[in-house]
Amino acid sequence: MQPSLEKLRKFFRLEHENKYENKAIIGGLAKMLDFWEGEARADGIAEEVIQAVISRLRSYEKLSADGRAESLKGLWKRIGDTYPEAGQKPKTQQQPQQQAPRPPRPAQQEQPKKTEDTPAPRPQQPQPQQQQQKPKPVPAPRSESVAGARHSQTPAALSAKLTVLQGVGPAHAKTLENLGLQTLGDMLYYFPRRYEDYSQLKPIKSLFYGDVVTVLGTVQSLFNRPIRGGKSSVIEIVLSDGTAGIRLSFFNQPWLANRLKEGDAISVSGKVDQYLGRLVMNSPDWEPVEVENLHTARIVPIYALTEKITQKWLRGQMNQVVTYWAPAVVDALPENIRSAAKLMPLGDALMQVHFPESQDRLKSARERLGFDEIFYLQMGVLRQKRDWKSVEGRRFPVSDEWLGARLTSLPYTLTSAQQKSLEEIRADLDSGRPMNRLVQGDVGSGKTVVAALGASMVIENGAQAAIMAPTSILAEQHYRNFVSLLAGDGGFLQQSEIRLLVGDTPEAEKEAIRQGLADGSIRMIIGTHAVIEGPVIFKDLQFVVIDEQHRFGVDQRAELRSKGTNPHLLVMTATPIPRSLALTVFGDLDISVIDVMPEGRQPINTYVLRPQERERAFTLIRGQIKDGKQAFVVYPLIDESEKIEARAAVDDFETLSKEVFPDLKVGLLHGRMKPAEKDEVMLKFRDRQYDILVSTTVVEVGVDVPNSTVMLIEGADRFGLAQLHQLRGRVGRSADQSYCLLIPTHEDATENERLQAMARTNSGFELADLDLKTRGPGEFLGTRQAGFASSLKMASITDVPLIEKARTQAQALFERDPDLSQPEHTLLAEAFERFWGEGKGDVS
Ligand code: ADP
Ligand code: MG
């Protein structure tokens, strides 16, 4: 593992041992960013990972202990996605070949998975060497291209090498390259990581412990004092401003003795500390006051650093660049858009974002720069949608009579929302364009049947359909569902025309299925990723359904689509998509929302219980089972490497089945069972051979056993909100009152914000918004979204007003001049092309 990751792990572990008190590092975990970032870059760690670490650690301090545990765990998991070796046990061997430092690359090259999703179909223009990564809608434009975009039309000076700067020689230029900085333009777009507001000067007399301030004064005395038996030294200065004096300590900076002497006037900035009851400042930032007050007495930018350069030095260089070149930047955004959106001119924004005159100006600058990012993304998304629609899709019309017959054969009437979605799908299938639709509906809203009916329209017209689910349990369940919906009484298919293909399917059967898919005798295939594995060839695949889309890697989705020619695509998600994301990340998809629950459903009564109240939960379960119902008991998965104090499904299964419910039938399901064993347990539970199913989170996704009415979640504080909501969705699937009982690991956690939110609302949308606000988009929404969000350097994916503003403008412009071919848009067109990468005209 890379040393910087190793280090991260060490501190996380320490922090875990310290009960997440933010003490693993003096001054808080965020302090480690000061050195870690540079080290990570030197290790060649992916920029996205670095950014993830930065943003997590920066907000770490503000979180509750629970939130912190959660945050670090999520972060480590995120790191593990990119660096699987980091997810391993600590003993993992180092792999030197992976450690070769490399310059930061655009994210989509390094991690294609992170940046794309449902691709635009451009089969007529194959780009052989890009095959694998070809579908790349909404890629995450990286700093390089962003910078390139914005100063594309500016004086040649901006593409000048950094060596033109005073004080930057070839060696420094090389160092700056580690930060992705090669040209003056890159520098302009290298935004501060944060700011320190030193704009309030204070007299020393009125300082308080804990203040972060700038003070001006003269050096009264200066001592160099050896410490630790002479191994180190500390320079102690008494600084006085006439109102009082304060002691400054500088550790291990002996050279200061030559730089400063009694009587020198300096300004110092930093935090006021305490030592033996007296106020002190430890190693504050300082500078002589004759010099322009660049580092102090104002809002000071703090940049991400790399080895061998200091904050002060970089800031000085930045000042040079910004002062001379920001005013020279040509603003590609047309004046009318700029004034309609009330935005600061680009040059001013670049100036203010580096060296803000005030918090207000900084805010405007950030808004302007954020607007640009979203605006270009929106333009891309709109163009992509247009391109998508410009390809031909086969038509699959069905008659009202045919559809009517399908509907009457269902065991229930579709809800109005299901009907509407179905009509939308029907229209798409008869539009002559490939469908590219996302069906979004809360857990239990009945998406499956909509997909089944959509698929049957295509099958009715002679083509094939494929449905891909993230787990074999779910695929199996869909299979049974589809068979009974489409091949049962009143169905129009033979059972043999619908098949199930999962990893566990015997090889001989797989072979037969492949044969059937190739010759067309199988018309609908349902399965896991096994469906896309190598040799599967379809005779005529025209309809592709991806269930629980956020569970899939991008490549898998693309691969399934590539098994047909411009097939119609339906992706389904139970993860509610907050409005901001629907507008941005999913802006290229058509969206159907199933926002009505099937008739007779009651809200699930949700309670947070203290661990001591577990008996009450058992009583409720007992009562429900007496009424012929069933119950789930779910435990958090245990990560063996961390001994989190959570109750384990396997351990507690014994107790539950032998001591608590000896008279009831209790089944056990967990991730380490073989798929066939899992299916067997699920089937038995469904057939009521078990009253209670003790399980890990493998039941989270999609499992449908309407007779169960209790969901008891142990260690509930260990789960994310989205997960809790998904788990709860396993019950409440019939007209009977259902219950969700949440028991946290410790009594303190009953106040946990997520658990309280669960008790407060049943609405997945409300919960999603909350989750997005507290944890950011990455965790909640899977890979495409995470990649997208991290491509935004300035804009926040949760900033709905900004997103809407940018979208409105992008849309209006797109309607006027979709190709940006009008002369007044030349600058913009060029900036746009650069933003999305050279030669990638279709943004895909
Ligand atoms: P999800 O949207 O979570 O995938 P499912 O498709 O699994 O939901 O449906 C949840 C349950 O609701 C299933 O048992 C299904 O048979 C049932 N269901 C679906 N539509 C209706 C309806 N219109 N009326 C009654 N029950 C329905
Ligand atoms: Mg489902």
Image (cartoon, rainbow, N blue to C red):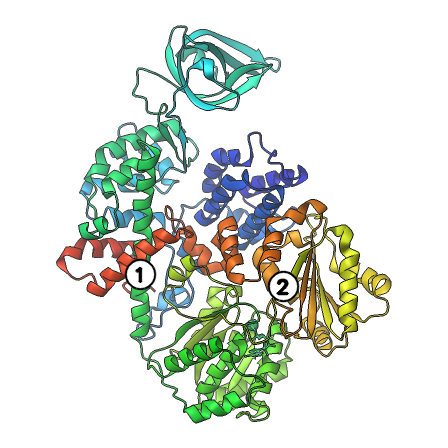
* Above or below, 466 relative to 782: below
The amino acid at mark 2 is Leu
Q: Quadrant of residue 582?
A: bottom left
Q: Is residue 663 left or right of residue 629?
A: right
* Residue at point 42%, 35% (across, down): 305
* Residue at point 43%, 46% (across, down): 102
* Above or below, 100 relative to 562: above
Pointer 1 or 2: first along the chain: 1
Alpha carbon of mark 1 to alpha carbon of mark 2: how far? 36 Å
The amino acid at mark 1 is Gly
Does mark 2 have its CB less than 8 Å from ligand 1? no
Q: Is residue 814 left or right of residue 14?
A: left
Q: Is residue 736 left or right of residue 779?
A: right
Does mark 1 have its CB less than 8 Å from ligand 2? no
* Res 512 seen here: no
Q: Residues within 10 Å of mark 2 (few under 14, many from 20)?
A: many
**Pointer 1: what residue?**
380
* Res 615 seen here: yes
Q: Looking at the picture, tell me which residue is in the foreground, 765 or 377.
A: 765
From the top left corner, tell me how far across and down residue 122 is, in percent. Answer: 33, 72
Name, please, the residue furthest toward the left: 823
**Which callout, 1 or 2, points to the residue nearer the camera?**
2
**Disc ID at residue 727:** 2
Q: Looking at the picture, tell me which residue is in the foreground, 59 or 466.
A: 59
Q: Residues within 10 Å of mark 1 (few under 14, many from 20)?
A: many
From the top left corner, tell me how far across and down residue 744 is, in percent. Answer: 69, 51
Q: Looking at the picture, tell me which residue is in the foreground, 747 or 396.
A: 747
